[in-house]
Image (cartoon, helix red, strand yellow):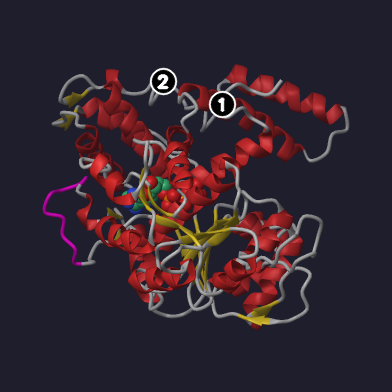
Protein backbone atom coordinates (compact mmCIF):
# COMPACT_ATOMS: atom_id res chain seq x y z
CA UNK A 1 0.00 0.00 0.00
CA UNK A 2 1.52 3.33 -1.04
CA UNK A 3 0.62 6.07 1.34
CA UNK A 4 0.76 9.62 0.17
CA UNK A 5 -1.90 11.95 1.47
CA UNK A 6 -3.66 12.78 -1.76
CA UNK A 7 -3.70 9.24 -3.03
CA UNK A 8 -4.68 8.05 0.36
CA UNK A 9 -7.70 10.31 0.44
CA UNK A 10 -8.72 9.13 -3.01
CA UNK A 11 -8.25 5.53 -1.93
CA UNK A 12 -10.90 6.07 0.74
CA UNK A 13 -13.34 8.46 -0.91
CA UNK A 14 -16.27 7.11 1.09
CA UNK A 15 -14.44 7.14 4.41
CA UNK A 16 -17.07 8.89 6.51
CA UNK A 17 -16.53 8.04 10.15
CA UNK A 18 -19.59 7.46 12.26
CA UNK A 19 -20.48 10.26 14.62
CA UNK A 20 -18.34 9.81 17.71
CA UNK A 21 -15.63 7.70 16.04
CA UNK A 22 -12.31 8.92 17.46
CA UNK A 23 -10.30 10.57 14.68
CA UNK A 24 -6.61 11.34 14.32
CA UNK A 25 -4.64 13.28 11.74
CA UNK A 26 -1.09 11.99 11.25
CA UNK A 27 1.41 14.25 9.43
CA UNK A 28 4.79 12.77 8.61
CA UNK A 29 6.91 12.60 5.46
CA UNK A 30 7.81 9.01 6.39
CA UNK A 31 5.22 6.75 4.69
CA UNK A 32 6.00 3.95 7.11
CA UNK A 33 4.77 5.98 10.08
CA UNK A 34 1.54 6.83 8.24
CA UNK A 35 1.00 3.19 7.39
CA UNK A 36 1.79 1.93 10.88
CA UNK A 37 -0.57 4.41 12.53
CA UNK A 38 -3.39 3.29 10.25
CA UNK A 39 -2.68 -0.31 11.18
CA UNK A 40 -2.46 0.44 14.89
CA UNK A 41 -5.72 2.41 14.90
CA UNK A 42 -7.97 0.36 12.61
CA UNK A 43 -11.40 1.24 11.30
CA UNK A 44 -14.17 1.21 12.44
CA UNK A 45 -12.84 1.93 15.95
CA UNK A 46 -10.78 4.88 14.72
CA UNK A 47 -10.61 7.12 11.71
CA UNK A 48 -7.04 8.05 10.74
CA UNK A 49 -6.32 10.78 8.17
CA UNK A 50 -2.77 10.90 6.85
CA UNK A 51 -0.68 13.58 5.16
CA UNK A 52 2.97 13.57 4.10
CA UNK A 53 3.31 17.35 4.27
CA UNK A 54 2.01 20.18 6.42
CA UNK A 55 -0.06 21.91 3.72
CA UNK A 56 -2.10 18.75 3.02
CA UNK A 57 -2.34 18.19 6.76
CA UNK A 58 -3.81 21.64 7.26
CA UNK A 59 -6.35 21.06 4.50
CA UNK A 60 -7.40 17.77 6.13
CA UNK A 61 -7.53 19.49 9.52
CA UNK A 62 -9.90 22.14 8.21
CA UNK A 63 -12.03 19.65 6.30
CA UNK A 64 -12.38 16.88 8.91
CA UNK A 65 -11.74 18.63 12.21
CA UNK A 66 -9.96 15.60 13.74
CA UNK A 67 -9.94 14.95 17.48
CA UNK A 68 -6.14 15.06 17.69
CA UNK A 69 -3.03 15.55 15.56
CA UNK A 70 0.20 13.54 15.51
CA UNK A 71 2.81 15.77 13.92
CA UNK A 72 6.41 15.11 12.90
CA UNK A 73 8.64 17.94 14.01
CA UNK A 74 11.07 17.64 11.10
CA UNK A 75 9.22 18.13 7.86
CA UNK A 76 10.96 19.08 4.61
CA UNK A 77 8.90 22.12 3.49
CA UNK A 78 7.77 23.50 6.81
CA UNK A 79 8.90 22.72 10.33
CA UNK A 80 6.47 20.91 12.59
CA UNK A 81 6.95 23.67 15.16
CA UNK A 82 5.66 26.36 12.81
CA UNK A 83 2.82 24.00 11.90
CA UNK A 84 2.03 23.50 15.59
CA UNK A 85 1.63 27.24 15.92
CA UNK A 86 -0.74 27.30 12.95
CA UNK A 87 -2.85 24.40 14.25
CA UNK A 88 -3.11 26.20 17.57
CA UNK A 89 -4.36 29.28 15.73
CA UNK A 90 -6.95 27.18 13.87
CA UNK A 91 -8.26 25.45 17.01
CA UNK A 92 -6.30 25.50 20.29
CA UNK A 93 -8.57 22.80 21.74
CA UNK A 94 -7.22 20.11 19.40
CA UNK A 95 -4.30 18.36 21.11
CA UNK A 96 -1.15 18.09 19.00
CA UNK A 97 1.36 15.34 19.83
CA UNK A 98 4.82 15.98 18.39
CA UNK A 99 7.04 13.21 17.06
CA UNK A 100 10.73 13.89 17.33
CA UNK A 101 13.87 12.23 16.10
CA UNK A 102 17.24 12.30 17.82
CA UNK A 103 18.43 15.79 18.54
CA UNK A 104 15.02 17.42 18.23
CA UNK A 105 13.59 16.36 21.58
CA UNK A 106 14.80 19.58 23.25
CA UNK A 107 12.92 21.65 20.68
CA UNK A 108 9.79 19.60 21.23
CA UNK A 109 10.06 20.01 24.97
CA UNK A 110 10.23 23.75 24.45
CA UNK A 111 7.17 23.53 22.23
CA UNK A 112 5.17 21.96 25.02
CA UNK A 113 4.99 25.22 26.89
CA UNK A 114 3.79 26.62 23.55
CA UNK A 115 0.77 24.35 23.78
CA UNK A 116 1.75 20.94 22.37
CA UNK A 117 -0.07 18.12 24.17
CA UNK A 118 2.93 15.80 24.43
CA UNK A 119 5.93 14.66 22.47
CA UNK A 120 7.26 11.23 21.69
CA UNK A 121 10.72 10.27 20.48
CA UNK A 122 11.10 8.05 17.42
CA UNK A 123 11.36 5.12 17.17
CA UNK A 124 8.45 4.23 19.46
CA UNK A 125 6.41 1.16 20.24
CA UNK A 126 2.62 1.05 19.74
CA UNK A 127 2.39 0.55 23.52
CA UNK A 128 3.94 3.97 24.07
CA UNK A 129 1.99 5.95 21.50
CA UNK A 130 -1.50 4.42 21.79
CA UNK A 131 -2.26 5.50 25.38
CA UNK A 132 -1.02 8.98 24.47
CA UNK A 133 -3.32 9.14 21.45
CA UNK A 134 -6.29 7.85 23.46
CA UNK A 135 -5.67 10.40 26.13
CA UNK A 136 -5.37 13.23 23.55
CA UNK A 137 -8.62 12.12 21.87
CA UNK A 138 -10.40 11.90 25.22
CA UNK A 139 -9.18 15.38 26.19
CA UNK A 140 -10.23 16.79 22.85
CA UNK A 141 -13.68 15.25 23.14
CA UNK A 142 -14.11 16.80 26.57
CA UNK A 143 -13.03 20.21 25.37
CA UNK A 144 -14.92 20.25 22.09
CA UNK A 145 -18.10 18.22 22.44
CA UNK A 146 -20.63 20.76 23.70
CA UNK A 147 -22.35 19.82 26.94
CA UNK A 148 -25.64 21.51 26.14
CA UNK A 149 -27.48 22.71 29.22
CA UNK A 150 -31.22 23.31 29.34
CA UNK A 151 -31.71 26.98 28.54
CA UNK A 152 -28.58 27.22 26.38
CA UNK A 153 -30.89 28.28 23.60
CA UNK A 154 -29.65 25.50 21.35
CA UNK A 155 -32.65 23.58 20.13
CA UNK A 156 -32.35 20.16 18.63
CA UNK A 157 -34.88 20.00 15.83
CA UNK A 158 -34.07 16.39 15.03
CA UNK A 159 -34.68 15.18 18.55
CA UNK A 160 -32.35 13.09 20.69
CA UNK A 161 -29.53 11.34 18.93
CA UNK A 162 -28.81 14.24 16.61
CA UNK A 163 -25.28 15.11 17.51
CA UNK A 164 -25.40 18.48 15.78
CA UNK A 165 -26.38 20.22 18.97
CA UNK A 166 -23.81 18.39 21.09
CA UNK A 167 -24.55 16.26 24.09
CA UNK A 168 -27.67 17.32 25.96
CA UNK A 169 -27.34 17.45 29.72
CA UNK A 170 -30.70 16.29 31.03
CA UNK A 171 -32.46 17.18 34.24
CA UNK A 172 -35.71 18.80 35.37
CA UNK A 173 -35.84 17.88 39.06
CA UNK A 174 -35.18 20.76 41.48
CA UNK A 175 -31.70 19.46 42.44
CA UNK A 176 -30.58 19.36 38.79
CA UNK A 177 -32.09 22.77 38.05
CA UNK A 178 -29.96 24.06 40.92
CA UNK A 179 -26.90 22.36 39.37
CA UNK A 180 -27.54 24.13 36.06
CA UNK A 181 -27.96 27.44 37.88
CA UNK A 182 -24.67 26.89 39.68
CA UNK A 183 -22.87 26.15 36.41
CA UNK A 184 -24.27 29.39 34.99
CA UNK A 185 -23.22 31.35 38.07
CA UNK A 186 -19.67 30.03 38.34
CA UNK A 187 -18.56 29.34 34.76
CA UNK A 188 -17.41 32.86 33.93
CA UNK A 189 -15.94 33.58 37.37
CA UNK A 190 -12.33 32.48 37.41
CA UNK A 191 -12.54 30.34 40.55
CA UNK A 192 -11.66 26.73 41.35
CA UNK A 193 -14.68 24.45 41.26
CA UNK A 194 -15.12 21.15 43.05
CA UNK A 195 -17.67 18.78 41.51
CA UNK A 196 -18.94 16.10 43.89
CA UNK A 197 -21.10 13.10 43.15
CA UNK A 198 -21.21 9.32 43.03
CA UNK A 199 -19.79 7.45 40.09
CA UNK A 200 -21.68 8.04 36.84
CA UNK A 201 -23.68 11.04 38.09
CA UNK A 202 -22.23 13.36 35.43
CA UNK A 203 -19.25 15.09 37.09
CA UNK A 204 -17.27 15.09 33.86
CA UNK A 205 -20.25 16.49 31.96
CA UNK A 206 -20.53 19.33 34.49
CA UNK A 207 -16.78 20.04 34.28
CA UNK A 208 -17.06 20.24 30.49
CA UNK A 209 -20.03 22.59 30.70
CA UNK A 210 -18.14 24.89 33.09
CA UNK A 211 -15.10 25.01 30.81
CA UNK A 212 -17.17 25.53 27.67
CA UNK A 213 -19.12 28.40 29.24
CA UNK A 214 -16.02 29.99 30.78
CA UNK A 215 -13.92 32.90 29.57
CA UNK A 216 -11.13 30.38 28.98
CA UNK A 217 -13.16 28.28 26.52
CA UNK A 218 -10.79 29.09 23.66
CA UNK A 219 -7.69 28.25 25.67
CA UNK A 220 -6.00 24.92 26.38
CA UNK A 221 -7.98 22.32 28.28
CA UNK A 222 -6.42 19.18 29.73
CA UNK A 223 -7.85 16.41 31.87
CA UNK A 224 -6.12 13.99 34.20
CA UNK A 225 -7.54 11.06 36.10
CA UNK A 226 -5.54 11.20 39.32
CA UNK A 227 -6.56 7.67 40.34
CA UNK A 228 -5.30 6.04 37.15
CA UNK A 229 -1.67 7.18 37.52
CA UNK A 230 0.83 6.08 40.19
CA UNK A 231 2.10 8.86 42.48
CA UNK A 232 5.57 9.41 40.97
CA UNK A 233 4.20 9.50 37.43
CA UNK A 234 1.35 11.81 38.44
CA UNK A 235 3.85 14.20 39.98
CA UNK A 236 5.81 14.57 36.78
CA UNK A 237 2.61 14.53 34.72
CA UNK A 238 1.35 17.57 36.64
CA UNK A 239 4.55 19.45 37.38
CA UNK A 240 7.06 18.06 34.87
CA UNK A 241 10.62 17.04 35.71
CA UNK A 242 14.17 18.03 34.91
CA UNK A 243 16.54 15.78 33.02
CA UNK A 244 18.20 13.38 35.51
CA UNK A 245 15.64 14.08 38.26
CA UNK A 246 15.27 10.32 38.77
CA UNK A 247 16.31 7.10 37.09
CA UNK A 248 14.78 7.09 33.64
CA UNK A 249 14.33 10.86 33.45
CA UNK A 250 16.54 11.15 30.38
CA UNK A 251 14.80 14.28 29.10
CA UNK A 252 13.20 17.30 30.68
CA UNK A 253 9.42 16.95 30.79
CA UNK A 254 6.87 19.77 30.83
CA UNK A 255 3.94 19.14 33.13
CA UNK A 256 0.26 19.99 32.77
CA UNK A 257 0.44 23.06 35.03
CA UNK A 258 2.95 24.54 32.60
CA UNK A 259 1.19 23.42 29.41
CA UNK A 260 -2.18 24.66 30.63
CA UNK A 261 -0.96 28.14 31.52
CA UNK A 262 -3.89 30.44 30.68
CA UNK A 263 -6.22 27.46 30.33
CA UNK A 264 -8.15 24.92 32.38
CA UNK A 265 -7.11 21.68 34.04
CA UNK A 266 -9.69 19.06 34.98
CA UNK A 267 -8.47 16.83 37.80
CA UNK A 268 -10.74 13.82 38.08
CA UNK A 269 -10.72 11.55 41.16
CA UNK A 270 -8.91 14.20 43.21
CA UNK A 271 -9.93 12.35 46.40
CA UNK A 272 -7.47 9.60 45.48
CA UNK A 273 -4.42 11.88 45.61
CA UNK A 274 -1.64 10.81 47.97
CA UNK A 275 -0.55 13.14 50.82
CA UNK A 276 2.58 14.22 48.92
CA UNK A 277 0.58 15.15 45.85
CA UNK A 278 -1.96 16.98 48.00
CA UNK A 279 0.83 19.10 49.49
CA UNK A 280 2.17 19.93 46.03
CA UNK A 281 -1.31 20.76 44.76
CA UNK A 282 -1.94 23.06 47.70
CA UNK A 283 1.21 25.01 46.94
CA UNK A 284 0.47 25.51 43.27
CA UNK A 285 -3.10 26.61 44.04
CA UNK A 286 -1.98 29.00 46.78
CA UNK A 287 1.11 30.50 45.23
CA UNK A 288 0.38 29.95 41.56
CA UNK A 289 3.87 28.64 41.13
CA UNK A 290 5.68 25.32 41.33
CA UNK A 291 8.99 23.67 40.51
CA UNK A 292 9.52 20.79 38.14
CA UNK A 293 10.58 17.57 39.90
CA UNK A 294 14.35 17.85 40.40
CA UNK A 295 14.27 21.55 39.52
CA UNK A 296 14.78 24.61 41.68
CA UNK A 297 13.47 27.39 39.43
CA UNK A 298 9.92 28.45 40.40
CA UNK A 299 7.59 28.50 37.41
CA UNK A 300 4.57 30.79 37.40
CA UNK A 301 1.28 29.41 36.19
CA UNK A 302 -2.24 30.70 35.74
CA UNK A 303 -4.48 27.65 35.50
CA UNK A 304 -8.12 27.29 36.41
CA UNK A 305 -8.64 23.99 38.21
CA UNK A 306 -11.88 22.06 38.08
CA UNK A 307 -11.66 19.02 40.34
CA UNK A 308 -14.05 16.11 40.79
CA UNK A 309 -14.37 13.17 43.11
CA UNK A 310 -16.81 10.47 44.14
CA UNK A 311 -15.10 10.16 47.53
CA UNK A 312 -16.70 11.53 50.66
CA UNK A 313 -14.18 14.32 51.30
CA UNK A 314 -15.73 15.25 54.66
CA UNK A 315 -15.04 11.72 55.88
CA UNK A 316 -11.57 11.80 54.27
CA UNK A 317 -10.77 15.06 56.09
CA UNK A 318 -12.10 13.61 59.34
CA UNK A 319 -9.86 10.53 59.08
CA UNK A 320 -6.90 12.68 58.00
CA UNK A 321 -6.51 11.22 54.49
CA UNK A 322 -7.44 14.49 52.74
CA UNK A 323 -5.99 17.88 53.67
CA UNK A 324 -8.65 20.35 54.72
CA UNK A 325 -6.57 23.34 53.50
CA UNK A 326 -6.47 21.78 50.02
CA UNK A 327 -10.20 21.10 50.21
CA UNK A 328 -10.89 24.81 50.86
CA UNK A 329 -8.60 25.85 47.98
CA UNK A 330 -10.26 23.49 45.52
CA UNK A 331 -13.65 24.31 46.83
CA UNK A 332 -14.01 27.99 46.04
CA UNK A 333 -17.31 26.80 44.66
CA UNK A 334 -18.89 23.34 45.01
CA UNK A 335 -21.40 21.64 42.76
CA UNK A 336 -22.94 18.48 44.21
CA UNK A 337 -24.68 16.08 41.89
CA UNK A 338 -27.59 14.08 43.26
CA UNK A 339 -27.69 10.30 42.83
CA UNK A 340 -29.98 9.27 39.98
CA UNK A 341 -32.36 7.51 42.38
CA UNK A 342 -32.97 10.90 44.04
CA UNK A 343 -33.93 12.67 40.81
CA UNK A 344 -37.63 11.66 40.84
CA UNK A 345 -39.30 12.03 37.45
CA UNK A 346 -35.96 12.58 35.74
CA UNK A 347 -35.57 8.78 35.62
CA UNK A 348 -38.51 8.09 33.25
CA UNK A 349 -37.68 11.25 31.27
CA UNK A 350 -34.02 10.20 30.83
CA UNK A 351 -34.99 6.58 30.13
CA UNK A 352 -37.23 7.71 27.32
CA UNK A 353 -34.59 10.11 25.99
CA UNK A 354 -31.83 7.49 25.92
CA UNK A 355 -34.11 4.88 24.30
CA UNK A 356 -34.86 7.33 21.48
CA UNK A 357 -31.26 8.48 21.14
CA UNK A 358 -29.64 5.03 21.19
CA UNK A 359 -32.35 3.47 18.97
CA UNK A 360 -31.46 6.09 16.38
CA UNK A 361 -27.73 5.41 16.79
CA UNK A 362 -28.16 1.64 16.62
CA UNK A 363 -30.65 1.79 13.76
CA UNK A 364 -33.33 0.03 15.84
CA UNK A 365 -37.10 0.41 15.61
CA UNK A 366 -38.42 1.87 18.76
CA UNK A 367 -41.86 3.17 19.48
CA UNK A 368 -42.65 2.90 23.16
CA UNK A 369 -41.72 1.44 26.51
CA UNK A 370 -44.25 -0.96 28.05
CA UNK A 371 -45.49 0.31 31.46
CA UNK A 372 -44.09 -2.81 33.25
CA UNK A 373 -40.66 -2.08 31.75
CA UNK A 374 -40.78 1.54 32.85
CA UNK A 375 -41.83 0.42 36.31
CA UNK A 376 -38.59 -1.64 36.55
CA UNK A 377 -36.59 1.42 35.53
CA UNK A 378 -38.25 3.71 38.07
CA UNK A 379 -37.93 1.25 40.96
CA UNK A 380 -34.28 0.34 40.35
CA UNK A 381 -31.77 1.94 42.72
CA UNK A 382 -29.18 2.82 40.01
CA UNK A 383 -25.92 2.44 41.95
CA UNK A 384 -24.04 3.23 38.73
CA UNK A 385 -26.27 6.28 38.10
CA UNK A 386 -26.63 7.77 34.59
CA UNK A 387 -23.85 5.60 33.16
CA UNK A 388 -25.66 2.47 34.36
CA UNK A 389 -28.94 3.74 32.92
CA UNK A 390 -27.30 4.29 29.54
CA UNK A 391 -25.77 0.79 29.68
CA UNK A 392 -29.10 -0.89 30.52
CA UNK A 393 -30.88 1.00 27.73
CA UNK A 394 -28.22 -0.02 25.18
CA UNK A 395 -28.27 -3.67 26.26
CA UNK A 396 -32.06 -3.71 26.15
CA UNK A 397 -32.15 -2.23 22.66
CA UNK A 398 -29.60 -4.73 21.39
CA UNK A 399 -31.82 -7.55 22.65
CA UNK A 400 -35.11 -5.97 21.54
CA UNK A 401 -36.84 -7.53 18.55
CA UNK A 402 -39.86 -5.27 18.20
CA UNK A 403 -40.87 -1.64 18.53
CA UNK A 404 -42.31 -1.98 22.06
CA UNK A 405 -39.81 -2.47 24.85
CA UNK A 406 -41.23 -5.27 27.01
CA UNK A 407 -39.51 -6.60 30.20
CA UNK A 408 -38.31 -9.72 28.34
CA UNK A 409 -35.75 -7.53 26.53
CA UNK A 410 -34.21 -6.25 29.76
CA UNK A 411 -30.75 -7.54 30.75
CA UNK A 412 -30.95 -10.72 32.78
CA UNK A 413 -31.91 -10.13 36.40
CA UNK A 414 -32.45 -6.40 35.92
CA UNK A 415 -35.18 -5.07 38.17
CA UNK A 416 -35.99 -8.54 39.59
CA UNK A 417 -33.39 -9.05 42.27
CA UNK A 418 -30.85 -6.51 43.45
CA UNK A 419 -28.05 -6.15 40.92
CA UNK A 420 -24.63 -7.47 41.79
CA UNK A 421 -23.17 -3.98 41.60
CA UNK A 422 -25.67 -2.72 44.18
CA UNK A 423 -26.01 -5.50 46.68
CA UNK A 424 -24.07 -8.67 46.04
CA UNK A 425 -25.98 -11.93 45.94
CA UNK A 426 -25.38 -14.09 48.98
CA UNK A 427 -23.05 -16.73 47.44
CA UNK A 428 -20.87 -14.10 45.80
CA UNK A 429 -20.71 -12.00 48.95
CA UNK A 430 -19.92 -14.92 51.20
CA UNK A 431 -17.07 -16.12 48.95
CA UNK A 432 -15.63 -12.64 49.11
CA UNK A 433 -16.07 -12.48 52.88
CA UNK A 434 -14.23 -15.80 53.27
CA UNK A 435 -11.38 -14.55 51.09
CA UNK A 436 -11.12 -11.28 53.03
CA UNK A 437 -11.18 -13.19 56.32
CA UNK A 438 -8.34 -15.41 55.18
CA UNK A 439 -6.26 -12.39 54.08
CA UNK A 440 -6.95 -10.77 57.46
CA UNK A 441 -5.83 -13.84 59.37
CA UNK A 442 -2.66 -13.91 57.22
CA UNK A 443 -1.98 -10.39 58.55
CA UNK A 444 -2.25 -8.82 55.08
CA UNK A 445 -2.08 -5.04 54.64
CA UNK A 446 -3.29 -2.78 51.86
CA UNK A 447 -6.43 -4.85 51.69
CA UNK A 448 -8.49 -2.34 49.78
CA UNK A 449 -6.02 -2.19 46.88
CA UNK A 450 -5.46 -5.96 46.98
CA UNK A 451 -9.15 -6.85 46.81
CA UNK A 452 -9.94 -4.23 44.17
CA UNK A 453 -7.02 -5.45 42.06
CA UNK A 454 -8.17 -9.07 42.32
CA UNK A 455 -11.72 -8.18 41.33
CA UNK A 456 -10.49 -5.95 38.49
CA UNK A 457 -8.26 -8.73 37.11
CA UNK A 458 -11.26 -11.01 36.75
CA UNK A 459 -13.56 -8.24 35.54
CA UNK A 460 -11.16 -6.84 32.94
CA UNK A 461 -10.18 -10.28 31.62
CA UNK A 462 -13.81 -11.30 31.24
CA UNK A 463 -14.97 -8.09 29.60
CA UNK A 464 -11.95 -8.03 27.27
CA UNK A 465 -12.59 -11.62 26.27
CA UNK A 466 -16.27 -10.85 25.58
CA UNK A 467 -15.21 -7.80 23.55
CA UNK A 468 -12.61 -9.89 21.67
CA UNK A 469 -9.82 -7.65 22.89
CA UNK A 470 -11.43 -4.51 21.46
CA UNK A 471 -10.40 -1.76 23.89
CA UNK A 472 -13.09 0.70 22.79
CA UNK A 473 -15.89 -1.86 23.20
CA UNK A 474 -14.49 -3.07 26.54
CA UNK A 475 -14.12 0.48 27.85
CA UNK A 476 -17.78 1.19 27.05
CA UNK A 477 -18.87 -2.03 28.78
CA UNK A 478 -16.76 -1.20 31.81
CA UNK A 479 -17.69 2.45 31.92
CA UNK A 480 -13.99 3.39 31.96
CA UNK A 481 -12.19 5.69 29.59
CA UNK A 482 -9.82 3.99 27.14
CA UNK A 483 -6.70 5.54 28.78
CA UNK A 484 -7.84 4.34 32.21
CA UNK A 485 -8.55 0.85 30.88
CA UNK A 486 -5.19 0.64 29.11
CA UNK A 487 -3.38 1.77 32.23
CA UNK A 488 -5.29 -0.77 34.43
CA UNK A 489 -4.51 -3.57 31.94
CA UNK A 490 -0.84 -2.70 32.16
CA UNK A 491 -0.85 -2.23 35.92
CA UNK A 492 -2.60 -5.55 36.60
CA UNK A 493 -0.77 -7.53 33.92
CA UNK A 494 -4.03 -8.59 32.30
CA UNK A 495 -3.73 -10.05 28.81
CA UNK A 496 -5.31 -7.40 26.56
CA UNK A 497 -7.02 -10.23 24.63
CA UNK A 498 -8.77 -11.14 27.84
CA UNK A 499 -6.99 -14.17 29.34
CA UNK A 500 -6.27 -13.64 33.03
CA UNK A 501 -2.59 -13.78 34.12
CA UNK A 502 -1.34 -17.14 35.39
N1 LIG B 1 -27.56 14.92 33.24
C1 LIG B 1 -27.13 14.13 32.26
N2 LIG B 1 -27.75 14.15 31.05
C2 LIG B 1 -27.33 13.34 30.05
N3 LIG B 1 -26.30 12.48 30.16
C3 LIG B 1 -25.64 12.44 31.32
C4 LIG B 1 -26.02 13.25 32.42
N4 LIG B 1 -25.18 12.98 33.45
C5 LIG B 1 -24.32 12.04 33.01
N5 LIG B 1 -24.59 11.72 31.73
C6 LIG B 1 -23.89 10.70 30.94
O1 LIG B 1 -23.56 9.62 31.81
C7 LIG B 1 -22.26 9.11 31.56
C8 LIG B 1 -21.40 9.24 32.81
O2 LIG B 1 -21.19 10.64 33.07
P1 LIG B 1 -19.80 11.20 33.63
O3 LIG B 1 -18.64 10.50 33.00
O4 LIG B 1 -19.84 12.68 33.54
O5 LIG B 1 -19.93 10.73 35.14
P2 LIG B 1 -18.87 10.89 36.31
O6 LIG B 1 -19.62 11.32 37.50
O7 LIG B 1 -17.72 11.75 35.87
O8 LIG B 1 -18.39 9.38 36.49
P3 LIG B 1 -17.07 8.81 37.24
O9 LIG B 1 -17.16 9.20 38.68
O10 LIG B 1 -17.18 7.33 37.09
O11 LIG B 1 -15.88 9.40 36.54
C9 LIG B 1 -21.72 9.89 30.39
O12 LIG B 1 -22.00 9.18 29.20
C10 LIG B 1 -22.54 11.17 30.42
O13 LIG B 1 -22.65 11.72 29.15
Asked if 381 appears above or below 196 in the picture, the reply is above
Q: Position of residue 22 (x, y in %)?
A: 37, 46
Q: Which residues are magenta?
A: 153-161
Q: Which mark is residue 481?
A: none
Q: Which residue is mark 2?
A: 413
Mark 1, other Cα within 10 Å: few <14 / some 14–19 / many ≥20: few
* Mark 2, secondary structure of its residue: loop
- Quarter of image, res 312: bottom right
Tell me the distance, in whole angstroms, between the alpha carbons under discs 2 and 1: 13 Å
Label 2 CB sits under 8 Å from any ligand 1 atom: no
Asked if 372 appears above or below 489 in the picture, the reply is above
Q: Position of residue 201 (x, y in %)?
A: 43, 50
Mark 2, other Cα within 10 Å: few <14 / some 14–19 / many ≥20: few
Left or right of 82 on screen, residue 59 = left
Residue drawn at x 84%, y 34% as measured from the top left? 444
Left or right of 367 on screen, residue 433 = right
Task: Please identify the quadrant where the C terminus is shown.
Answer: top right
* Mark 1, secondary structure of its residue: loop
Residue drawn at x 55%, y 80% as measured from the top left? 302
* Whether residue 473 is visible: yes
Q: Which mark is residue 424?
A: 1
Of pointers 2 and 1, the one earlier in the residue sequence = 2
Residue drawn at x 23%, y 37% as measured from the top left? 361
- Indicate yes or no whether the magenta region holds residue 155: yes
Amino acid sequence: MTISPKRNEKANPAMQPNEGTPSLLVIDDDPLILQVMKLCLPEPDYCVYTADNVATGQALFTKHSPDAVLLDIQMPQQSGLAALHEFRELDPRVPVILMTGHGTAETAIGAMSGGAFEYITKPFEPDEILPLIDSAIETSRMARMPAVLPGDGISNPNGPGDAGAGEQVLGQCPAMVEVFRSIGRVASRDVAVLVLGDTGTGKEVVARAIYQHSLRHDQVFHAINCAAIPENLLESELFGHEKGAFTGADQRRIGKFEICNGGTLFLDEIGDMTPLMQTKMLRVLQEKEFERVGGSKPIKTNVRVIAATNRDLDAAMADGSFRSDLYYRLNEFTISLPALRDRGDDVPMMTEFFFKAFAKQLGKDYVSIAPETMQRFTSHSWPGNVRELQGVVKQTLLKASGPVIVPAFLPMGFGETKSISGHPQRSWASDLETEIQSLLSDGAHNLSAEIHDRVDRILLAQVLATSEGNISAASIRLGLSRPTLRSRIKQLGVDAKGSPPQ
